[in-house]
Amino acid sequence: MSAPGVAEATADAATVLAFDFGTRRIGVAIGNTVVRIAHPLTTIATEANTERFAAIEALIGQWQPAALVVGVPLYADGTGHEMTSRAERFARQLEGRFRLPVARADERYTTHAAGIALTEAGLRGSARRAARDAVAAQQILQAWFDDPESRRSDARGTA
């Protein structure tokens, strides 16, 4: 399953927002298709859908992205689980609400890797927790930028 319109939307210079979806928090990262470097942006720390989508709407209004990327969690063997379907639902909701192309990207181990990177950078406790999801979103977006195939396919590598 590919994300229709993502390759076209990001062919020229464009801003892309990426999301590390979670039930308690959503990490957000931003990048540009010219320099293809992702940066952590913010963490949406609420479980209320109306508040989540209001925050996302504000970010989309502010940054005017041409496309969105949602990290899709998978088991190590590439199979899906409960959070896979929840992240897919979130991606479909983004498509429906904001009428932007939404790519899916493999997010295996990104939250864990983000936590390690933040610990190595000297962040501990609440500061580390506050930054972890945005850094995970950064890793999702950076991997998407680094792999041209990912811009044409979903998290499971099918075209």
Image: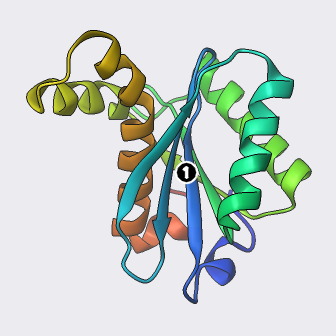
Above/below status of 24 relative to 80 = above
- SS at mark 1 in the image: strand
Which residue bears the numbered disc 1? Answer: 18
Q: Quadrant of residue 93?
A: top right
Above/below status of 5 relative to 115 = below
Residue at coordinates 90% horizontally, 49% vertically from top-left? Answer: 97
Please state if 47 lies on the left or on the right of 35 as rendered.
right
Please state if 111 lies on the left or on the right of 159 as rendered.
left
Q: Nearer the viewer, residue 80 or 107?
A: 107
Instruction: Judge whether residue 76 can be spotted in this image.
Output: no
- Picture quarter with the N terminus: bottom right
Instruction: Judge whether residue 92 can be spotted in this image.
Output: yes
Residue 30's spot in the image, x, y percent?
50, 57
Residue at coordinates 43% horizontally, 60% vertically from top-left? Answer: 144
Residue at coordinates 41% horizontally, 67% vertically from top-left? Answer: 145
Residue 77's spot in the image, x, y percent?
38, 30
Please state if 121 lies on the left or on the right of 51 as rendered.
left
